[in-house]
Amino acid sequence: MRYLAIFILCLGTGIFRTQIAAAQVKARSEISGARQRDGDIALTITCPKPFINGNNRYILYTGHKEFGRYEISRKDGKGVITFLIPKDEFNHLAEGSPVYMTYGHVEAEETDMEALAASSHRCWSLGKFSRSVLKK
Amino acid sequence: MTSQQTIHAGNQIRNQAVVIHVVLLLILFLATRYHAEAQGTPDPGLLGTHTVIKAEYNLGDLSYTPPAAAMFPSNMEERGCVHYPSDLASGPFPVLIWLHGQHDVCYEISNDSSFTSVWPCPAGSAPITSYEGYDYASQVIASHGYVVISISANAINTLSNSLPDYAMNARGVLMQHHLDLWNGWNTTDTTGPFGHTFVGRLNMKKVGTMGHSRGGEGAIYNANYNASLGSPYGIKAVLTLAPVDFYRHYINGIPLLDISPYCDGDVSDLEGVHYFDDTRYNVPTDVAPKHHILFMGANHDFFNTVWTPGSYVAGGADDWADYGWNPFDPHCGTSAPSRFDTTKEKAAYITYASAFYRLYLGQETQFAPILEVNDIVPPASSTLDSADVYVTYHAGYEDRLDVNRTNAAACETTNTLTGSVTETGIVGPEICGGGLTLPVCDGGLVNNQKPHRGTTTLAGLAQMKLTWSDTTQSYENDVPATNQDVSSYQALTFRSCVNFPETTSGIDNDFTVQLIDSAGNTASQAVSSHSHALFYEPGTQANDLPKLVFNTIRIPLNSFTSVNLSKIRHIRFKFNKSATGAVLISDLAFSNPVCGNLSAAFTDSIGKRYKTFFTNKTAYTSGDSLAYLWNFGDAASGVLDTSTAVNPTHIYPTHNSYTVCLYVKDFRKNGLTCTDTLCQSVVLANDAIPELAPGNIQIIPNPAKDHIQITGTGPDDQLVLVNLYGQVVLKTTMTQPDVALPAAIPSGVYSAVITTANGRTVLKLVINH
C-alpha cells in the first residue's frame, strides 16, 4: 500500500512537471531564407508553432544592430515572421555575428543574449548571420 | 451606415446569440453596480441615471485618406461605435475617444480559428471588431452623461508591424480624425450618419481619451498631435491602458492615468510606467496630476471582450497562459486565487476609469481620494480587495514640495531642498536604477522584472536603495530652514517597493516614518498603518516575476501629532520593524490632493448695532483663482443676505444666533474647480441699545411717496423698514438725511427702525406711491 502511494505520488508529480514543462517549451525557430523586396531584404524565420501576434514587438538582433520592422503570419499551423531589413544595412552586417530574436525589446548590449535564449521562451537564438541566406 | 440600439439601465438588448454570455456577465456587472457599499469615498463605478443608447457608424473600409503626418501608406476605415445618453438635450456632454491596440484583423467565417491580416477583409472572412471590446465600460460611463466613442483601427493593425513607427503616428492621427468627424456632426455637418442627432450635444472642450496597448501609445501621440494643431479639442484626460511605450514619447500638462496589469503576458515589462516616470519633473511647472494603477491579478487582454476567449466569435487569448508563461504560477497562473477573472478585470477597469474621467472631465472631485492614495479601500463596484490594487499619485508642481527626488547620484547625500541626507548603518545605500551613468539596483533581474528601469541611453526611475540589517538603522533627510513650514500640506508621500532580491522571500516589509521638528519633538507613524504597498512581490515565473513596481505611500500629516508642522527639520525612516529588510524609494515629498489645501474658514467680529465684520481665512494654494459666496443666515434681509465679497460686512436686525455659510470655489491651474463650504454659528448678543424717545427723530413727509427725510440722525445711523409681516424691505446707512423709497416697495404701512449711536427708535411710516 505504501509503495502504491509512493508510485501514485511520483506519477502525479511527473504529470505536474510535464505540464509545467509543456507550457514552457519553446518551439525552435530558424532562418528559412531571404530575398530582396524593393529597398529591403526580407528575411524569413519560421517556427513549427505560430508566433504571438500581440501588441509587443519582435526584434531581430545581429552585429550590434536591431531590426524591428516585420510581417507576421501563420501558414499551415506554422509561424512565419519576415523581417524587413534595409538593403544597405543588410550589406553591412558582420558576417558570423550571432543572431537573436526576441518578443519584447531588450537592451542587447547590456544583456547576455545567449543566456536569455537558453532560459526565456521569448528569446530565440538563430545561429550566425551569413549573407548567403539571401540566396535561399 | 449606422445601427442603433437602446440600452436601458440594468439591462441590455443585443441581437447576436453568441454574445448572450456577455449579456449575462454584463447583467452581473450591472447588478453589482446597484450595490453601494459604505466607504469613505463615493463609488464612481455605479450606474448613472442616464439611459444609454449604442449606435454604430461605418463610412467605409478605406474611406479615410490620412494626411502625411500619419506616416501611413494606405487608406483606413472610418468605423466605430458610440454610447451616449438618450437625453441628449440635457447636454452638451463630455466626449471620450477610445482606441484599441494590435490584434487580428479578420477571421474566416467558415473557420473562426483562422485569421487573415489583409484589409479590407477578403471574401469569406469578416472583420474582428476590436473597438466593441470596451462596450461594457462605455455603457457605465455614458450613463453618467458622457458620449463614449470607440474607434476601429484594423487597417492600421494590418500594416503596423512593418512601419518604422509601428503606426503610432497613424493611430494618433486617426483619433484626431474621429474627433474631427464628431465635431462636424456636433456643428455643421448634418449629412453624416446621425443627421441632426448630435448637433450641439458634444462638449469638444472636454475630451478624454483612452488607448489600450499599442493604442495607448497612440493616445499619447494624439494628445501631442492635437497640441501641435493648436489644441482644437480640449483633451483634459488621457488614460493609457496596459500600453506599450516603444518610443518614449510623453505628455505634460494633461492629467494622466496609466494602468499596469501585473500578470501582463504580452507587454510583460509594463513599459507604460515610463509615461508616468518620464513626466514627473521634466517640465518644472507642470500642474497636471499623474496617476498610475497596478492591478495585481490582471492580464493584458481581458480588458477587451473581443480579445477575451469565449467572449467573441473568433480569437482571443489569456495572454498569460497562451503566450507561454507558466499557467501554474502561484500568483498569475490561470487558477491562482489572485488572478482576476474576466468579470473582475472588467469591473476594476470600469471603476477606476470612471473615477478618472468623472474627476477631470466631470469635475466630480468627490472621487479624487481614490486616485490620490487618500482612500486606499477599493470601491465596491471594482470587486477588488486592498491587495488587488495599488495607486500611485504625483501631484502637480504647485501641490508638492519635493524633498528628495532621488533622480541623481548627488541625492544620496544632498536632497532636492539642499538638505543633508544621512544614513545609519544602511547596507550599500545608493541611488540606482535610473539608467545612464547610474548603477543598476539589481543586476540579476531581467527587463520584465524592473519596469521602471533605465538603460545606458535612456533614463528611467532612479531610486534610493535602502537595505538594513538591524533595527537601529535609519535614513534621514534634513529640511532646510526656509522649507520647514509644511503646515500647508496634507501628507508626506513617497514611492516605494520591497527590493525582493535583497530581502527575505515572502515577507512583507515595514518601517517607521518620523518627523522631527526644530524643538526636537518626534512623531512616528508606521508605514503599515497607512499602506499595504510594502508587500513582497508575488509570482515565481522565471524571467518575469516577481516585478519591482513602485507605488505611493501616503501618510497624512495630521497623524504626526505633537510636532510643530511649521518647523519640520528632519524626515527619518527608522527601520525598527524587522531585523532585516530592503526597500527602494523615490519621490519623497510633502504633497496635497488635486484640490490643493483648499479649506474654507472665516472669523467674525461684531461691532455696534449688530454690524458684523467677516474676515476670510480660507486656505488655498497661492496663485489659484477663488470665488466666494456668503450666506449670512438672515433671510429676512432679502438680497442683502448674500455677498460675493472677500471680507463682507452684514448688519443684522437684532440679537440672535445666525448660521453663516461661506462657499468657496477654487479655479485651479490643473483645470479642476474645487469647492469647500464652512457653516458656523455667529451669536449676536443683545447690545442693549436704549430706546429713544420718538420726539428726537422725525420722518418727513409721512405719508411719503418716493422719498423721506429723517431728522435727528447722523451719517452712520441705520434705517430698516419692516413691513407688517416682519420682512425687511429696505436697509440702509443714512449717509445723508434724505432716503429714496424705491418703487419696488409697495404702498403700505411700515415700521421704520432707526438706530443711532444713542439708541434706537421705531416710527410708523406710511408709503403711498
Image (tube, helix red, strand yellow):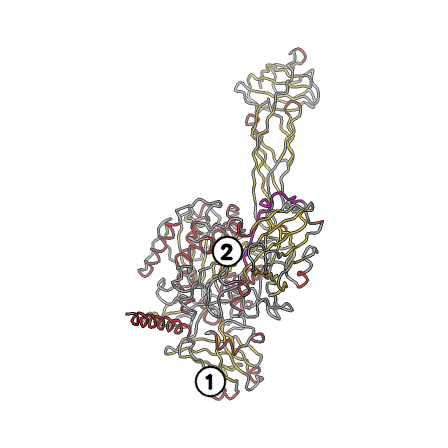
Between B603 and B704, the one lying in front of the other is B603
Q: Residue B390 carries which label?
A: 2
Q: How crowded is mark 2: few (under 14 residues within 10 Å), some or many (20 or more)?
A: many
- Does the magenta-highlighted stretch encompass residue B703? no
Q: How many labels does the image show?
A: 2
Tell me where the magenta segment starts and ends, as one range: B550-566
CA gap, disc 2 and disc 1: 48 Å
Q: Which amino acid does label 1 sit on?
A: Gly
Give the structural element (helix, strand or loop) at label 2: strand
Between A103 and B171, the one lying in front of the other is A103
Residue A118 image position (x, y, % from top left): 48, 77
Image quadrant containing the N terminus of chain B: bottom left
Residue B383 image position (x, y, % from top left): 42, 53
Circle 1 residue: A33
Q: Residue at x 57, y 27 (%)?
A: B658
Q: Which amino acid does label 2 sit on?
A: Tyr
Q: How crowded is mark 1: few (under 14 residues within 10 Å), some or many (20 or more)?
A: some
Q: Determine whether, in the image, residue A96 is placed left or right of residue B649.
A: left
Residue B768 visible in the shown view: yes
Q: Mark 2 lies on which chain?
A: B
Image quadrant containing the C terminus of chain B: top right
Residue B172 visible in the shown view: no
As drawn, the residue found furthest toward the left would be A1
Between B268 and B708, the one lying in front of the other is B268
Q: Residue at x 68, y 60 (%)?
A: B413
Residue B31 image position (x, y, % from top left): 37, 49
